[in-house]
Amino acid sequence: MTASGCEALRVERDDLGVVTVTIDRPDRMNAVDYATLCALGETITEVAADPGTRVILLAGEGGAFTTGADLQAAREQAEAGTAPPVEATMDAANTLVRAVLTAPVPVIAAVNGPAAGVGVSLALSADLMVMSDDAYLLFAFTNIGLMPDGGASVLLPASVGRAVASRMLLCGDAVSAAEASEVGLVVDVLPAAELHAAAAKLARRLARGPRRALELTKRAVTLAALTELEATLGREHEGQCELLVSPDFAEGVASILEKRRPDFA
């Protein structure tokens, strides 16, 4: 079924209370426009509040987890004068990440193909991440004149340390599933054909566990590892709101849509 009246999301529940939330925009590599971003946060919040939910599994339809913001839609909205305020976009991203981190049940991200932009932040916010062997994480914020958002500037260093996080975030390179495994970002890397079955098996294993014990364990780990979360979200909000209206971001978007190297000079 669709979620929150959003055709771009699909929600499925199994007999053990595993709820799979799938971003279903394969024609856009599951890039999310503002409406989908909002619906995703609302859906996870609603699903997490249901006492029958035991685990949430995040997935992407087709060959991508999600490539982040839908830049084509953003440009079209800007040209039509219908683009949401940049503050609203940042608020929606922060709401989504908070929903995942505060959900009282484990959240698993099954990354099939690229996870980029706010999509990589979403994957990082999950308690457990599994990846297909051809998947990758793309921290391309600086490549288009932006800074990390969705909590990425605290979620990543909390997982891999400052030096590795700085390299990934400043250079904006793609991080393969193999490298993600080496630095401890993922719990398993599988052949693409086996990813969703393996993620579902892990989810069902957790769903059979003691719900309250898992909730309190997740809360303890999250609070211990992410003491700077709210301060970081505030810094990202302020910085990104500045950068989203900058000439560098306009050039970054143009370079992607025109398939050329950006010129930030």
Image (cartoon, helix red, strand yellow):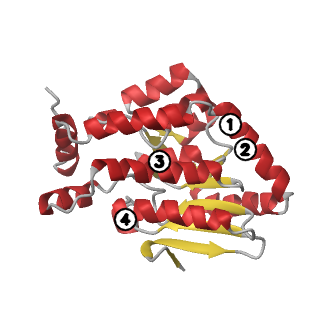
Q: Is residue 116 visible?
A: no
Instruction: Check disc 2: other Cα within 10 Å, few if <14, some if 14-19, many if 20+.
Output: some
Label 2 or label 3, whichever comes before in sequence order? 3
Which mark, by number, is residue 100? none
For the residue labelled by badge 4, is the local secondary structure a helix, a strand or a loop? helix
Label 1 or label 3, whichever comes before in sequence order? 3
Mark 3 residue type: Asn
Mark 4 residue type: Ala
For the residue labelled by badge 1, is the local secondary structure a helix, a strand or a loop? helix
Mark 1 residue type: Leu
Mark 2 residue type: Arg
Tell me where residue 232 appears, x and y as whole percent. 49, 33
Instruction: Check disc 3: other Cα within 10 Å, few if <14, some if 14-19, many if 20+.
Output: many
Seen in the picture, residue 265 relative to 238 is either above or below; the reply is above
Q: Quadrant of the C terminus?
A: top left
Tell me where residue 57 appears, x and y as whole percent. 63, 61
Which mark, by number, is residue 219? 2
Cα distance in 3D space between marks 1 and 3: 17 Å
For image coordinates 35% across by 35% down, the residue present is: 238
Query: Which residue matches tag 1?
Result: 223
Label 4 or label 3, whichever comes before in sequence order? 4
Which mark, by number, is residue 35? 4
Which mark, by number, is residue 94? 3
Cα distance in 3D space between marks 4 and 3: 14 Å
Cα distance in 3D space between marks 1 and 2: 6 Å
Asked whether the beta carbons under mark 1 and mark 3 sit within 8 Å of each other, the answer is: no
